[in-house]
Image: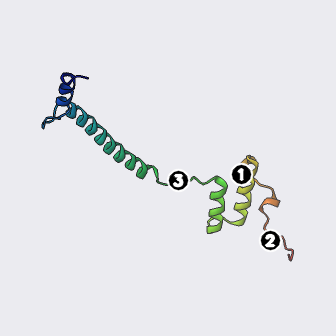
Amino acid sequence: MEIAQIIPVADTWGMNGYVGWGWMVGMMFMMVLFWGAIIFGVIWLIRGAVGSRPEERRESPTEILERRFAEGAVSVEDYRARRKVLANGSTEANGAHDEETLATPHAEGGNQ
């Protein structure tokens, strides 16, 4: 290579004590990468913080019935009748239930 070809390239990259357009283009590219990384990092942190909330798990009808029975809000008879309806997926006419479902172990009169 001749010296006449090297000098213009050296001048564009700031080889003579000043910053030429070569460094300016390189620094603009680095500035875009830097700010892109900053913006990406902030968005990533925000999405991570918002998305890390535990999802609310919905109780199934059976779990609600069991919880209400444990709290004492539902009697044994109601619990058994509703449990049967949930298990079978059907109801009897006019809400009537057979006596076996409604009977409690203590009401049967047996000593068990």
Q: Amino acid at mark 3?
A: Glu
Residue 78, percent across and down? 70, 61
Q: Residue at x 74, y 60 (%)?
A: 80
Q: Categorize mark 3 by other alpha carbons within 10 Å: few (<14), some (14-19), many (20+).
A: few
Q: Residue 75: in sight, yes or no?
A: yes
Which circle marks residue 107 in the picture? 2
Q: Nearer the viewer, residue 38 or 76?
A: 38
Q: Nearer the viewer, mark 3 or mark 2?
A: 3
Q: How many numbered markers are drawn?
A: 3
Q: Residue at x 13, y 35 (%)?
A: 16
Residue furthest left in the image:
17
Q: Amino acid at mark 2?
A: Ala
Residue 49, percent across and down? 41, 52
Residue furthest bottom in the image:
111
Q: Categorize mark 2 by other alpha carbons within 10 Å: few (<14), some (14-19), many (20+).
A: few
Q: Kindly identify which residue carries mark 3.
A: 56
Quarter occupied by residue 75: bottom right
SS assignment at label 1: helix
Q: Kindly identify which residue carries mark 1.
A: 86
